[in-house]
């Protein structure tokens, strides 16, 4: 599940980079250009949000989960909420507050990093447990 969330967050990050680099928000509000890019980024938040929430909820419901994985999952949840708040604020303020826009991009990168770290550690943990079971 962590890999799926990371892939969705990566795709959403690419869409966000496209929105930012082409000033899609300004062009959409100003002259109805690039609105499809803007709306794709806005509605594209659903898959990464659902996948990240699934990682968090599954980690809460897994009693034998390694504490590092649990911390990464919780961190991903906090970063997700922060990312959504920053995204709405950035949209409402029409990208006029540069630190807000940069924070939105930085938190997105941190969310991606936490999900990648979760995935790598989860795969290592899974491989070690398989190895132990094979020796028994």
Image (cartoon, rainbow, N blue to C red):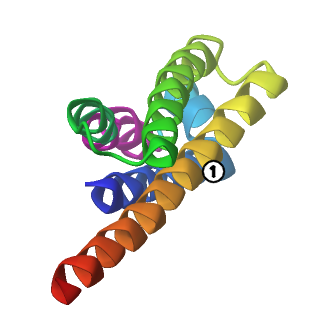
- Work out whether residue 27 or residue 12 is closer to the camera in this orientation and state it: 12
Q: Which residues are magenta?
A: 34-51
Q: Residue at x 34, y 39 (%)?
A: 52
Q: Position of residue 62 (x, y in %)?
A: 22, 39
Q: Position of residue 38 (x, y in %)?
A: 44, 38
Toward the bottom, the furthest residue is 135
**Quadrant into which the C terminus falls:** bottom left
Main secondary structure found in the magenta portion: helix
- Residue 18 position (above or below residue 20): below
Q: Position of residue 119 (x, y in %)?
A: 41, 62
Q: Residue at x 27, y 78 (%)?
A: 132
Whether residue 71 sits left or right of residue 99 in the image: it is left
Query: SS class of the residue under badge 1?
Result: loop
- Work out whether residue 111 or residue 46 is closer to the camera in this orientation and state it: 111
Neighbour class for label 1 at 10 Å: few (<14), some, many (≥20)? some
Q: Quadrant of residue 43?
A: top left
Residue 35 belongs to the span the image colors magenta: yes
Whether residue 107 sits left or right of residue 25 in the image: it is right
Toward the right, the furthest residue is 99
Whether residue 76 sits left or right of residue 99 in the image: it is left
Whether residue 63 sits left or right of residue 90 in the image: it is left
Q: Residue at x 74, y 22 (%)?
A: 100
- Work out whether residue 125 or residue 50 is closer to the camera in this orientation and state it: 125
- Work out whether residue 125 or residue 89 is closer to the camera in this orientation and state it: 125
- Residue 123 position (above or below residue 10): below
Residue 68 belongs to the span the image colors magenta: no
Q: Residue at x 46, y 55 (%)?
A: 118
Q: Quadrant of residue 134?
A: bottom left
Q: Position of residue 61 (x, y in %)?
A: 20, 31
The residue singled out by tag 1 in the image is 22
Toward the front, the furthest residue is 136
**Quadrant into which the N terminus falls:** bottom left
């Amino acid at each position: 599940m962590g890999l799926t969330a990371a892939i969705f967050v990566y795709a959403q990050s690419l869409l966000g980079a496209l929105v930012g680099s082409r000033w899609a928000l300004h062009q959409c509000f100003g002259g109805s250009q690039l609105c499809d890019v803007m709306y794709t980024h806005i509605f594209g938040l659903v898959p990464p949000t659902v996948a990240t929430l699934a990682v968090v909820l599954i980690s809460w419901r897994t009693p034998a989960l390694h504490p590092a994985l649990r911390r990464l999952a919780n961190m991903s949840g906090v970063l997700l909420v922060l990312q959504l708040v920053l995204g709405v604020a950035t949209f409402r303020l029409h990208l006029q507050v540069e630190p807000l826009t940069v924070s939105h991009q930085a938190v997105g990168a941190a969310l991606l990093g936490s999900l990648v770290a979760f995935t790598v550690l989860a795969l290592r943990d899974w491989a070690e447990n398989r190895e132990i079971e094979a020796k028994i």
